[in-house]
Amino acid sequence: MRFQPSRAQRRWIIALVAWPLLVSGCQRHGTGEAVDPAPASNLSPAVTAADLPLAGTEIPLLPPGEARALAQTYCLACHASDLIQQQRLTEAQWRAAVDKMQRWGAEIRDEDKSALVLYLTARFGSDNDRFVPIVARPEPRPSDFAQATERRTE
């Protein structure tokens, strides 16, 4: 006869086995010192420093207009201005985008939606040709592998 644990029993078994492993994996044996969360690896990450702009790179503000303050308040809370500036949406598409953002948690007041959509359509409508991408290069720095090697030798 084989023992067949129930779903609840399996969860307890997994928790009893996994918890000590997780806790011990986060500390060095005998020292109680936390382990560096970034593992030493010579694998290149999906996004490298070469893909990112330099710290201090200025992304332009949204262009002037009656509802610019609304767009800065509601849109720039989650998005950089260049993401908005590269759009070429019709009024119906901007309305749908604003509705979607509101459903996803943007705190856009209902009474501000019409003015916001009019601003976005006027500045970033289907005839939008204002967007110029920012070209930036990061400062040279040692590779992650070189840094990990230095940490091991210390």
Image (spheres, rainbow, N blue to C red):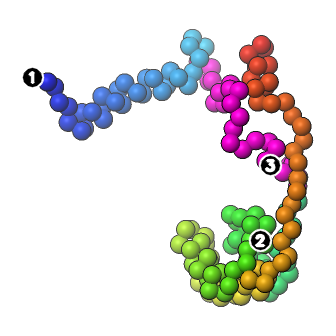
Q: Earlier in the sequence, mark 1 or mark 2?
A: 1
Instruction: Tell me residue 18's x, y (percent).
Output: 40, 27
133 left or right of 8? right
Instruction: Tell me residue 92's x, y (percent).
Output: 62, 86
For badge 2, the amino acid type reads Gln
At numbered mark 1, what does the secondary structure look like: helix, strand or loop? loop
Residue occupied by mark 2 = 86
Q: Residue at x 71, y 34 (%)?
A: 44
In the image, is residue 48 part of the stretch drawn in magenta? Answer: yes
**Residues at marks 3 and 1, CA–CA distance in whole angstroms:** 60 Å
Q: Residue at x 74, y 83 (%)?
A: 126
Q: Are marks 3 and 1 in contact (CB under 8 Å)?
A: no
For badge 3, the amino acid type reads Leu
In which quadrant of the rendered image does the C terminus lie?
A: top right
Q: Earlier in the sequence, mark 3 or mark 2?
A: 3
The secondary structure making up most of the magenta span is: loop
For badge 1, the amino acid type reads Met
Which numbered marker is on residue 52? Answer: 3
**Residues at marks 3 and 2, CA–CA distance in whole angstroms:** 18 Å
Residue occupied by mark 1 = 1
Front in this rendered view, residue 135 or 115: 135
Q: Which residues are magenta?
A: 32-57
